[in-house]
Structure formats: C-alpha cells, structure tokens
Image (cartoon, rainbow, N blue to C red):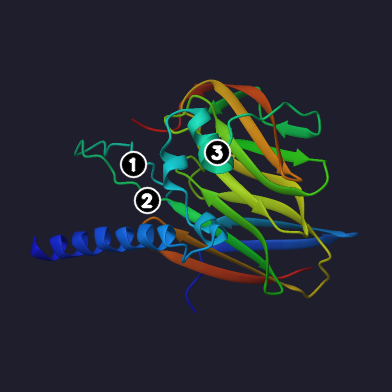
Amino acid sequence: MSKSSIKIRAKVKGNECEVKALIQHPMETGLRKDKKTGQVIPAHFIQEVNCQHNGKDVVNALWGTAISTNPYVSFIITGAKKGDTITMSWVDNTGGKDSSEAKVS
Amino acid sequence: MNMKRRVFLKGTLASGMVAVAVGAGLLSPRQVLAAWPKSAFEAKSVNDAMNGIYGTDLAPASGDIQLDAPDIAENGAVVPVKVTATMANVESITIISEKNQTPLIASFNLGATAQGFISTRIKMGQTSNVIAVVKAGGKVYSTRKEVKVTIGGCGG
C-alpha cells in the first residue's frame, strides 16, 4: 500500500470533533526561480480540498497559491461520534489528486 | 510539438464548451460555484478578489470574527492563521492577504455541521493586513489584522 499524502487526525471533545490534516504537497506559486538554472518553477498547487463525514460533505475548500508548502488545515464539526469515517481528498492544478480516510477517535 | 498543440486545442475547446453550457443554462449556479474561481484567485486587488468570491466588495467589520495571526511573522512562507466566527449559520470563511501579488488565499465553504472555525498556514509576500471574510446568513462580514513579515514567502 502506497503511503497517502494526507494525514488526518479527528478527535471528539464533547459535542465537537476537531479534524486536523497535514497534506504533503510542494504548493509552488509559479513565482519562484530555480537558483541553479534561473528558470521559473511552474505553479503546482492544490486548488480544491474536500472533506466528508460519513460520506456527507462538511468542508469544501478552494485554495490559491498562498497556502503554505505541505498544507495544514483544521476545522471543527459537530455530531461526529467515535468510529465515524472522515474522508479527505484534494485536486491540484496539474490534475494530480489523492484521498485518504480516518476514523474519529 | 504536435502533441502539445493537440492538447492545447483540446483545452481551449473544453473551456469554450463550459462557457456555452453556462450560457445555455445547462449548469446551475451551484455547480458553477463549485468550480475553482480562477479570476478571483488571479485578481490583483482585494476588491476584485472579494467580488469574485462573494459578488460584493463590501464587508462590514464584525466583532463576532476572531482572527488569530502573529504580530510579527519571521518567515512569510509559513504564517499560522486561525479564524473563529461566532455568529450563527456561517456559510464560508475566506482568507485574504492585502499585499500579496494575488490577495485571495483560500475560501472554505462550510457545511451545516461544520463550526465557524478554520485554522491553516499561509504565505505572505510582505507586511500586510490579513483579512478574514465570513459569510453568515447570506451576509458578508470581515475583520483584519496587520502581520509584519520579516522574510517574504512568495518567491520572485
């Protein structure tokens, strides 16, 4: 099994569940130059991130180039219980994509 | 070379067809919104970015939005930003950095069970205001905070 680019942690605290995710991605802005060749490094960044709780959309994020390299995002959802499934997926501007899921703990 | 030309032609054809589909009312506005708003993300001014996302550049300041960001960011490539909106029915949270080449950073659409809270890390080119824009109950509000950047994080 290849390692996913997304790491998800979801923890219940009372009625709320905090979902934290780290994604491995270069997030190139298209403004940076390669120090050796002087060539502009083409933009390569995540445009859309989707998160579902038990198959239902909870957060849909649209990103530009100004999200940091190896993006971190967290948010809070209500009504999640231990053992529920959190799914997250991303799509970047070159058509690359990945998804991952985790159980709420 | 020829291959690239083919791909390019296909691309222009496809985007042309989307525009036709929108014009003909085949796509509902909801579906159109779901697509990545290129013009808003490429906008060079805060007003254009706001118009691209919310269709308005008027966002009255609100005390119900808390924007947590450092006073001084040593590294502009990684600036932690946290937005907490305490009003009811928060629909989306958008983060804008006023003086970035393209000010719009990200827009989060929140579902019914998502709370008005987003935490992430952003890049800032230089010292600037960070603006958190929140849409709640069909209205748009904002709050801002200045972040001093020692080393810019956008390259170029």
Q: Which mark is residue A44?
A: 2
Q: CA distance from mark 3 to mark 2?
A: 16 Å
- Tell me: residue A14, above or below residue B68: below
- Tell me: residue B111, above or below residue A73: below
Amino acid of disc 2: His
- Tell me: residue A56, above or below residue A65: below
In terms of secondary structure, where does tag 3 sit? strand
**Residue at left offset 76%, top offset 69%:** A104
Share a chain, discs 3 and 2? no
Circle 2/circle 1 CB separation < 8 Å: yes
Q: Quadrant of residue B82?
A: top right
**In the shown orientation, is residue B132 left or right of residue A69?**
right
Residue A87: % across, % down? 63, 69
- The mark tally for this picture is 3
Amino acid of disc 3: Ile
Q: Which of the two discs, 2 and 1, labels the residue nearer the N terminus?
A: 1
Q: Which mark is residue B122?
A: 3
Residue under label 1: A30
Q: Observer-nearest residue: A83 or A58?
A: A58
In terms of secondary structure, where does tag 1 sit? loop
Q: CA distance from mark 3 to mark 1?
A: 16 Å
